[in-house]
Amino acid sequence: MFCQARRRDTLSVGLTRLTAAVLIAALVGAGASLGTVALVDGLGDDDSTTATTTEASPARSPSSLTDESIARVYAGAAPSVVQITSIQVATDPLTGQPQEGTALGSGFVLDRRGYVATNYHVVAGSRRVSVSFSNNDSLAAKVVGTDPSTDLAILRVRASEQALKPLRLANSDQVQVGQWVAAIGNPLGLDRTVTAGIISALHREIQAPNGFAIAQAIQTDAAINHGNSGGPLLDLKGNVIGVNSQIATAGSEGNIGIGFAVPSNTVRKVSAELIATGHVAHAYLGIGVQELTPDVAKTLNLPVENGLIVETVVKASAAAQAGIKAGERNVVIDGQSYRVGGDIIVAVDGRPVESTSDLLGILAEKKPGDRISVEVYRGTKRLKLDVTLGSQPARNGATTP
């Protein structure tokens, strides 16, 4: 569920169950059901377009965390965190008429030229956006570019370089489960609130606003609530390891200790493209898959124990043009439905693929027009297919046969 902070037109979107049978595109994939998930709304020391990369702090034992640790992180990072006010227009469900509302979110200064990072859903559909700094200055902001597929957006404000203190982006591939982290944002409009916790898990997949999913998300138990969206998740060195984006709500609208952040490596790549061109082109394969397990393989008498069962192929997609075959019939195994009889993907570009995360990680490195090899089992035969990747559509319009 996406969480809009203190929004007059409350927007709540339930999470459609993210099974592995989703359209596969770069940076987006499928994950397990978490009840409901909410977007939590709502900002390098260098002057370059992309913030400097730093190594993430190593995992710490609980005894090494002190109030002084969090105090240092807050003192260093809080001046770089901003509150974002977005004037948005939505259709009133009762009257069908456009209605103006205000949404509050968070963000952080990305570099000294005035670029600010936040979530796409914080500013989606906005007519006007303003950014408030810790000294109470409020500046009009321009939306430079947005990427619904990763729920990221870049804003720009006109301010002197001396007034801007960028945060550094860490290498999110270096973070570890159990590592202490801090989140700074504006929950419920309470500006520059800090909470602390640990990284609970890595490599999660969460749903993007356009119906695809965001790969490699970081799970944390640091308290995140409505209004935190777009704010930084920080290591104990004060470096950004992720952008807080969603929470699992389990029927509640508040924090239950399960929050998700878009990883900083994704932020680095996407922000550079948004600043350069205003948009991001994601490679797109165009299939719906289900992860194969040894038990399912044994039940179906398949020639391989692990891989991705191709359940659907989008018409005219890269996969369709390459001849990848979709499933033909439905079977139910231990209460789970599978569409079988199609190809089973076992490798892409020579790298084994056993999960949607494996495939997404490979596709995230590609661009539309890139050629990849896809190795599949079709019956008992192993085939290698050449695929020219397409461009991801604006929305995930997958349908199940």
Image (tube, rainbow, N blue to C red):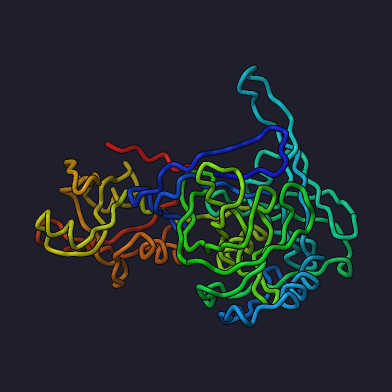
Give residue 66's quadrant in the image.
Answer: bottom right
Closest to the observer: 118 or 286?
118
Location of residue 279 with respect to 347 vertically, above or below = above
Q: Which quadrant is the N terminus positioned in?
A: top right
Q: Is residue 259 visible?
A: no
Give residue 301's quadrant in the image.
Answer: bottom left
- Residue 281 image position (x, y, % from top left): 52, 55
Location of residue 242 with respect to 191 vertically, above or below = below
Closest to the observer: 356 or 59?
59
Residue at left offset 53%, top offset 78%: 174
Residue at left offset 81%, top offset 69%: 165
- Residue 349 image position (x, y, % from top left): 32, 69
In the rendered structure, the answer to whether residue 174 lies left or right of residue 306 reads right
Q: Which quadrant is the C terminus positioned in?
A: top left
In the rendered structure, the answer to whether residue 181 lies left or right of residue 372 reads right
Residue at left offset 61%, top offset 54%: 152
In the rendered structure, the answer to whether residue 157 lies left or right of residue 148 reads right
- Residue 132 image position (x, y, % from top left): 83, 53
- Residue 355 image position (x, y, % from top left): 32, 62
Q: Is residue 9 visible?
A: yes
